[in-house]
């Protein structure tokens, strides 16, 4: 078997060297804002460092890649974040694609902790248009049209794999706030705007 990151021979999905390298997080933060307000989004990696791994989400082996990255980052989130009350974590859209898996549900699952409750299938996009490689103008004209599917009674962390322009995060925040749900911040694997 070959390491998903460097291609060297390994008995596991990632070689020991890549596991150590990817275990060194490049924490970042970006403030998003539009007419609906502001939102801080925290990231674990630089997009350029894991771009080739993020594109695996459209393939079967992406399940193993995302699970590995989530264990190195989202699973360790409690080491960086302390909150006294209860929080819910919601993925921007955690539906299973192509009968394979949901990459955002994998991230969400690994965020679960003593204070963070996971809310699967809580927020789904009604518009299925793909944003990958599309301009900000295209994204603004073709909103996700999120629909809240569950009653949430605690502040929320929004979860996704990548933040690019931030339009999806801001739109999700707006929908939750219309439903009287406080959004604390967004959390992603990588920020495409470095």
Image (cartoon, rainbow, N blue to C red):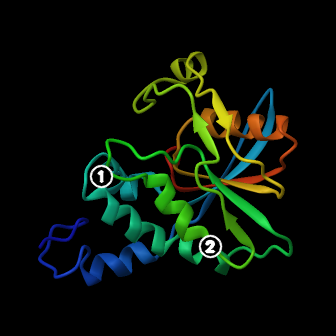
- Apparent side of residue 179 relative to residue 97 in the rendered image (left or right): right
In depth, the one of 155 and 136 nearer the eye is 155
Q: Secondary structure at mark 2?
A: helix
State the count of labels: 2
Q: Is 138 placed above or below 164 here?
A: above
- Residue annotated with mark 1: 56
Quarter of image, res 34: top right
- Apparent side of residue 41 relative to residue 97 in the rendered image (left or right): right
Specify which label sits upstream in the sequence, 2 or 1: 1
Marks 2/1 in contact by CB < 8 Å: the verdict is: no
Where residue 102 appears, as percent x and y from the top left, is: 43, 52
In depth, the one of 19 and 194 nearer the eye is 19
Graded by Cα atoms within 10 Å as few (under 14), some (14 to 19) or many (20 or more), the crowding at tag 2 reads some
Quarter of image, res 64: bottom left
Where residue 136 appears, as percent x and y from the top left, is: 55, 24
Q: Is 9 placed above or below 148 here?
A: below
Quarter of image, res 156: bottom right
Where residue 164 appears, as percent x and y from the top left, is: 53, 39
Q: Image point 77% across, 41% down: which residue?
A: 176
CA separation in Å, label 2 and label 1: 23 Å
Q: Image point 14% across, 73% down: which residue?
A: 8
Q: Is 126 placed above or below 59 here?
A: above
Residue 77 image label: 2
In depth, the one of 77 and 18 nearer the eye is 77
């Amino acid at each position: 078997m070959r390491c998903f990151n460097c291609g060297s021979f390994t008995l596991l999905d990632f070689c020991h060297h890549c596991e150590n390298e990817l275990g060194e997080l490049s924490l970042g933060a970006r403030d998003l804002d539009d007419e609906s307000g502001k939102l801080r989004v925290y990231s674990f990696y630089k997009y350029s460092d894991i771009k080739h791994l993020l594109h695996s989400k459209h393939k079967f082996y992406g399940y193993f890649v995302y699970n590995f990255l989530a264990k190195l980052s989202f699973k360790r989130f409690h080491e960086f974040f302390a909150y006294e009350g209860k929080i819910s974590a919601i993925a921007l859209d955690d539906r299973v694609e192509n009968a394979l898996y949901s990459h955002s549900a994998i991230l969400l699952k690994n965020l679960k902790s003593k204070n963070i409750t996971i809310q699967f299938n809580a927020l789904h996009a009604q518009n299925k248009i793909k944003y990958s490689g599309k301009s900000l103008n295209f994204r603004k004209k073709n909103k996700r049209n999120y629909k809240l599917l569950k009653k949430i009674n605690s502040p929320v962390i929004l979860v996704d794999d990548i933040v690019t322009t931030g339009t999806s995060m801001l739109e999700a925040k707006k929908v939750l706030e219309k439903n009287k749900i406080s959004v604390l911040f967004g959390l992603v694997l990588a920020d495409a705007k470095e």
